[in-house]
Image: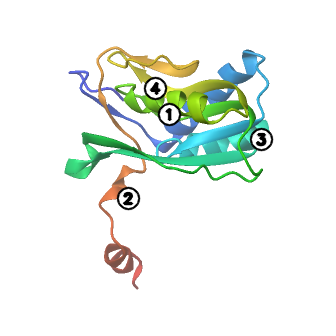
């Protein structure tokens, strides 16, 4: 649900999963065959996992981080992992890079450039996201929703960002 001022987008679990399914349809209808899904942790892990299951393709993971300050609302320096975790040795062939959104576009651009320059076994690389903000400098190959007002997206699992084990113990104690 987008707020009236267009500054916040609140997404339920059902909406979130429906958007990932719509992303899967877009990818499928493009008739592009790929070998591996590479998701960017953390935002791309949930969509990457579901797409890996739907397309029956191995899931590789690359950790990135740029949102750290103020409960993850302020973008800082971009950190890219040195290694990619993959069940098939080295990542190779046609790779679908998955993240949750193209916000500024900085992360996706940096990762695509790094992969193209440092991973010669990758023969083709495409990108997929759920949301693309208007301010993004990167245009993904596949995207479900374009967000012209650049809202802050409140994803359904963000409540866990502030939840700690002691709170869970209190919640589940009888």
Label 2 vs label 3, nearer the camera: 3
Q: Name the residue under label 4.
A: 109
Give the numbered dot on residue 111.
Answer: 1
Q: Which residue is drawn at 77% across and 41% down?
A: 57
Label 1 vs label 3, nearer the camera: 1
Q: Which of marks 2 and 3 is nearer the N terminus?
A: 3
Label 3, secondary structure: give it.
Answer: loop
Q: Which of marks 2 and 1 is nearer the N terminus?
A: 1
- Give the x, y percent position of residue 24: 67, 28
Quadrant location of residue 2? top left
Label 2 vs label 4, nearer the camera: 4
Quadrant of the image containing the N terminus: top left
Q: Is residue 72 left or right of residue 58?
A: left
Q: Which residue is drawn at 65% across and 43% down?
A: 50
Q: Which residue is drawn at 48% across and 16% down?
A: 139
Distance (Cα) linking label 4 and label 1: 6 Å
- Give the x, y percent position of residue 33: 79, 24
Distance (Cα) linking label 4 and label 3: 24 Å
* Frontmost residue, 105 versus 21: 105
Q: Name the residue under label 3.
A: 57
Q: Mark 2 points at which residue?
A: 160
- Give the x, y percent position of residue 8: 27, 30
What kind of colouring is applied to the model shown? Answer: rainbow
Label 1, secondary structure: give it.
Answer: helix
Q: How crowded is mark 3: few (under 14 residues within 10 Å), some or many (20 or more)?
A: some
Q: In this view, does 174 lie above or below 7?
A: below
């Amino acid at each position: 649900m987008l707020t009236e001022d267009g500054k916040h987008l609140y997404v339920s679990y059902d909406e979130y999963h429906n958007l990932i399914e719509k992303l899967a349809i877009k990818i499928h209808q493009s008739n592009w065959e790929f070998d591996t899904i590479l998701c960017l942790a953390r935002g791309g892990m949930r969509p990457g996992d579901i797409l890996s299951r739907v397309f029956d393709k191995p899931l590789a993971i690359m950790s990135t981080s740029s949102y750290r300050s103020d409960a993850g609302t302020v973008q800082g320096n971009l950190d890219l992992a040195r290694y990619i975790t993959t069940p098939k040795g080295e990542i190779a062939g046609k790779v679908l890079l998955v993240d949750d959104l193209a916000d500024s576009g900085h992360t996706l651009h940096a990762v695509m450039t790094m992969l193209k320059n440092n991973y010669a076994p990758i023969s083709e690389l495409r990108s997929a996201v759920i949301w693309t903000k208007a301010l993004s400098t990167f245009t993904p190959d596949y995207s479900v929703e374009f967000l012209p007002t650049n809202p802050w997206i409140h994803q359904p699992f963000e409540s866990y960002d502030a939840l700690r084990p002691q709170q869970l113990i209190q919640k589940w104690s009888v």
